[in-house]
Amino acid sequence: MKVLVIGGGGREHAICRKLAQSPHVTELLCAPGNGGISEIAECVPIAAADIHKIVELAASSAVDFVVVAPDDPLALGLVDELENAGIPAFGPRKNAAIIESSKIFSKNLMKKYGIPTADFQSFTEIASAIAFIREKGAPIVVKADGLALGKGVVVAQTEDEAIAAVRGMMEDGRFGKAGASVVIEECLSGTEVTVLAFCDGKTVVPMVSSKDHKRVFDGDRGPNTGGMGAIAPAPLYTPELARICEERIFKPTIDALNSEGRPFSGVIYFGLMLTDKGPCVIEYNARFGDPEAQSVLELLDTDLFEVFRAVREGRLAETPIKWKSGSAACVVMASGGYPGDYAKGKPISGLSDVPDGVFVYHAGTKSENGQYTTNGGRVLGVTATGAALDDALGLAYSGVKAINFENAHYRRDIGRT
Ligand code: AMP
Ligand code: GLY
């Protein structure tokens, strides 16, 4: 089988690495890929969101199966376009990917079907948004409706901060069209857990749980990022909690999407807050998380291509999926300045000096004449497994110590908060 993976971050590196291990996958392409991915797949320089060029590439290269990993092409309907062209594709269609691409849609869905989430209201007018903030008081959470690279959420500690966020989104167009409408919601407190699940429209199969670290600095300080590291499984996510989430959140979400005529096929991401009133949905995504995928897929003990194909063909219920015991940890090394402005093109050293058992996923790198250089905000995801979480973390951090690039920064407390 000739398989094409769409995307070019650490998540796609993890997906490509798993697919490269499958005996079914004889040829692997990735668009656009990155430096690390080019070691295991042929990288084609087409942007993930350039959906027409991607369909052309898949057709002209006689690709048998496409895996669409990032949010943008899913929201743009790449899976629909590929399937319409007769090319089997893994991922939700546009009408189901909306669960991520519109927060107003997903909040209304949860409200309609009684799925636990923070109380909210949505706004298209700035004056009523501000009046609502004044009425509710702080802390309060402001979210851009559309996709904003994980940066469209402000957890405001004061009314002024919330109002400034609303103005930035609705008046100054900080996120373009994505911020023209906003959700304003109750601030929840508790521990966050991510549960990714395979779903074929009928059956939902949760993967091992995980925990992302979204803030840029140690102690969960500083602005939100795409994710500075992840562990799997999440220690607080007990079998009892898993049962409650399946019953109150996972199944009801899939059933709700079906009732709305939007069957979901692909990976659904449940961002959960474990509150003292029980688990609540913070957000849905229509794809694997990044860096959660790097940790979770380390523990997968089944051929990923077989799982993808079973999902696409609606055979998930008959497909056994096995997980390794133990834990995985991924520590992201980022460019200085990220999630703000940062420089690119810094040479990376020490990649071959990491201890045995460490795998370095490339998130934003380029390979030029055998030298890797930085090419993004998140540069590397240094990943390891171990019998216990401490073993996985210890090994991943010893990998981080071996690697260097100018102004590299990483959190020292992954798995600890
Ligand atoms: P999201 O992009 O929706 O996952 O939001 C980014 C981060 O903002 C989440 O991971 C939470 O840490 C935080 N957040 C989002 N919604 C809420 C909420 N209602 N209450 C408290 N924190 C929130
Ligand atoms: N790590 C968070 C996300 O992928 O959305």
Image (cartoon, rainbow, N blue to C red):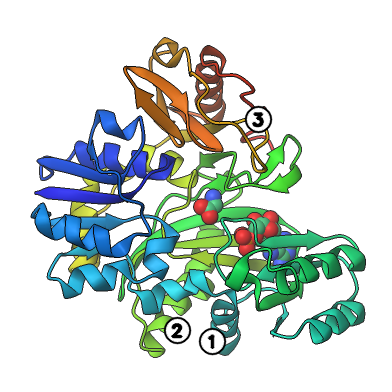
Residue 252 in view in this figure: yes
Q: Is residue 389 above or below residue 124?
A: above
Among the two numbered marks 3 and 1 on one chain, the one whose residue lies closer to the N terminus: 1
The quadrant where residue 62 appears: bottom left
The quadrant where residue 66 appears: bottom left
Among the two numbered marks 3 and 2 on one chain, the one whose residue lies closer to the N terminus: 2
Q: Residue at x 78, y 71 (%)?
A: 166
* Pointer 3 residue: 336
Q: Is residue 168 above or below residue 232?
A: below
How far apart are labels 2 and 1 at the CA level?
6 Å
Q: Marks 3 and 2: which is nearer the front?
A: 3
Q: Disc 2 vs disc 1: Cβ atoms closer than 8 Å?
A: yes
Q: Where residue 82 appears, x then y in whole percent?
A: 21, 67
* Pointer 1 residue: 113
Q: Residue at x 43, y 65 (%)?
A: 286
Q: Residues within 10 Å of mark 1 (few under 14, many from 20)?
A: some
Residue 277 in view in this figure: no
Q: Where residue 78 appears, x then y in whole percent?
A: 30, 67
Could you say whether the residue bearing mark 2 is in a helix, strand or loop? helix
